[in-house]
Image: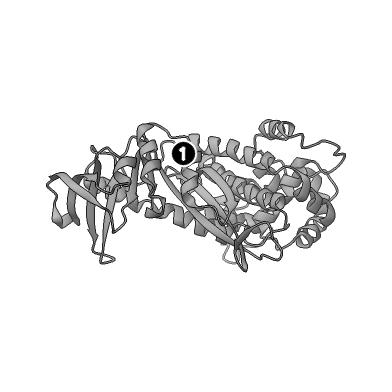
Amino acid sequence: MHSGRTIFSQLMDFLPRHEFNKCVRGYQGHYRIRTFSCFDQFLCMAFAQLTYRESLRDIETCLRALQPKLYHAGIRGHISRSTLADANEKRDWRIYADFAHVLIRIARQLYADEDFGLELEQTAYVLDSTTIDLCLSLFPWAHFRKRKGAIKLHTLMDLRGNIPCFICITKGTIHDLRILDQLIIEPAAFYIMDRGYIDFGRLYGLHQQRGFFVIRAKKNLDYTRRSYRQVDPSTGLRSDQTILLQGPKSSQLYPDPLRRISYFDAETNRRFVFLTNNFVLPPLTIVLLFKCRWQIELFFKWIKQNLRIKAFYGTSQNAVKTQIWIAISVYVLVAIIKKRLNINRSLSEILQILSITLFETVPLIHILTDSQLQNQKEPFSNQLNLFHS
């Protein structure tokens, strides 16, 4: 029962506090800290994410206005702009990265049986990146171009529940291909990528680790056809071939056969060619798997629109990474709450509701469902019945 507790306090009950404390101890987060703990910092930054605060001064002003409610919300330390700025600057961002991965593990277990539109026993991942522009004069460490700064958010997303299971934050100059070297390949899982990730040496390494990939081919692919299978043109399929690479370098980097599938999309009037090392799934399933890649584009769009990662509260690399990892934690926390409370709303709707109700003292489940409590008839009323006989 909520017992008069605030919505914010009820939200934070879903956080595994003991796991958070383990992350803090792992990086000595409380070394020489007397007040304003790492959990206080996390709660303040989570409040900023959920209520769309614009700056540290904005956070300080709003939280001080709610001072009588902060203790019961879990915030024990004194709130000030300088204290929060110092915490973001100095406390190791890896504390919040590790804790985000704890929440990700919980969310993936909850969404393990989630349907993503395809009857597929194996796990399917989408790999992509998004660029977050920064002002080079304020973020000189994030050099991207001559007069432009940026960082990249490289993400591997599980299509069951659209949960990010691997995230790497790098400078904008880091090529996407290098992230393939950091992945731990899950045998029999599918990795869906756009053609920017074509590197036949790395793809062959993924193949040798018994993972499957689905990737869009480049137009200048040099290959020879070994065999083909019949397809139904009415479905949009144009060909399903087994090929060998012919290029002097690519043939050495990937010596095994590949499957080449050609598909015409009538909606966009475009032709797509896909490469995969899976020869078992029907060709149309391979095409539909690649179409699921747009889920990660929607994720990037959603997180930029709903979470504060384009306006940063600090300019150091540590402060930026801290804010991004706490933003991701908030996203995953909302996904966990949605599943555990069986809420039939989108994540965007849940965030919109939470943004204006964080310090209401009503049950969380009532706020997030369509229950019309105000329509319930009261047992006693002083209002006279005009038509009483």
When asked about the image quadrant of residue 159, the answer is top left
Rendered location of residue 147, percent (x, y): 62, 69
Q: Residues within 10 Å of mark 1 (few under 14, many from 20)?
A: some
The three-letter code of the residue at mark 1 reads Tyr
Question: Which of the pair 219/340 is nearer the observer?
Answer: 219
Classify 28 as above or below 141. above
Q: Is residue 115 visible?
A: no
Residue found at x 74% / y 31%: 25
For the C terminus, give its image quadrant: bottom right
Rendered location of residue 371, percent (x, y): 54, 51
Question: Which of the pair 174/287 is nearer the observer?
Answer: 174
Question: Which of the pair 236/261 is nearer the observer?
Answer: 261
Q: Is residue 207 visible?
A: yes
Rendered location of residue 302, percent (x, y): 52, 58
Residue found at x 50% / y 59%: 301
Classify 186 as above or below 376. above
Q: Which residue is mark 1?
A: 111
Secondary structure beneath disc 1? loop
Q: Give the farthest residue toward the left.
A: 230
Question: Which of the pair 351/367 is nearer the observer?
Answer: 351
